[in-house]
Amino acid sequence: MTLPTLLTRDHRECDELLSNALGHAQAGRWAEAESSFSQFCDRVEAHFGAEESILFVRFEQATGMTHGPTAVMRSEHEAVREALDRINDAILERDANAVFGEGDALFILLQQHNLKEENILYPAAERAAGGDAASLEADMREAITDPASTAHRRQ
Ligand SMILES: [Fe+2]
Ligand SMILES: [Fe+2]
């Protein structure tokens, strides 16, 4: 699998988990909403962590661009994390209006972020990796499926 294919597929799977969580909230199934939202947050955090600690770092090292696209992506990750905290609070408070308002905004934020990565950054990172593209894909695959391994390696 190529790097863009791997990470695009992970984006789609995360989207699906978010839809599930919002669907449960919409139906008033709050316990299910809580557990599927926390599943979604874990997957997003694994994905973001892998990008921040592996993909972005290697792109920055290969291109020398530390204030370019990766800086924008890192700041968008922070905006998403803040939205996740707000939605989590709204779910715990059983505040349906806040969950839907924040949930819709998060969907849009994520779609815009993901499209930039899928169309621009992932292909550029793959090109920048050159002959190391396959090992970069393998490292990213391991990090998104087993985040603890990345956390361990980072130390
Ligand atoms: Fe990202
Ligand atoms: Fe991503």
Image (cartoon, rainbow, N blue to C red):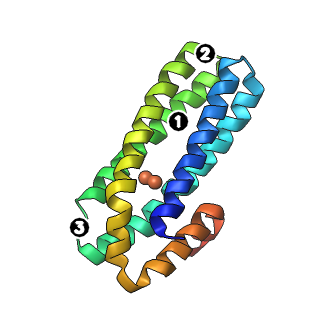
* Point 53% across, 36% down: residue: 84
Identify which amino acid the numbered label 3 is placed on: Met
Q: Compare marks 2 and 1 and give the one earlier in the sequence.
A: 1
Q: Position of residue 64 (x, y in %)?
A: 23, 73
Q: Residues within 10 Å of mark 1 (few under 14, many from 20)?
A: many
Question: Where is mark 2, residue-wise?
Answer: 96
Q: Contact (CB < 8 A) between labels 2 and 3? A: no
* Point 44% across, 40% down: residue: 110
Of 6 and 155, the residue lying toward us = 6
Q: Where residue 65 is drawn, which disc sits there?
A: 3
Quadrant of the frame with the N terminus: bottom right
Residue 35 lies in what quarter of the image? top right
Q: On screen, 94 above or below 134?
A: above
Identify which amino acid the numbered label 2 is placed on: Ala
Identify which amino acid the numbered label 1 is placed on: Leu
**Mark 1 element type:** helix
Q: On screen, 94 above or below 15?
A: above
Q: Where residue 146 is drawn, which disc sits there?
A: none
Q: Contact (CB < 8 A) between labels 1 and 3? A: no
Q: Position of residue 92 (x, y in %)?
A: 66, 24
Q: Compare marks 1 and 3 and give the one earlier in the sequence.
A: 3
Q: Position of residue 95 (x, y in %)?
A: 61, 15
Quadrant of the frame with the C terminus: bottom right
Residue 20 visible, this orientation: yes
**Mark 2 element type:** helix
Residue 155 visible, this orientation: no
Whether the residue under disc 3 has CB within 8 Å of ligand 1: no
Q: Position of residue 99 (x, y in %)?
A: 56, 22
In this picture, residue 131 sits left or right of residue 37 = left
Q: Give the CA separation, mark 2 to mark 1.
A: 15 Å
In this picture, residue 120 sits left or right of residue 37 = left
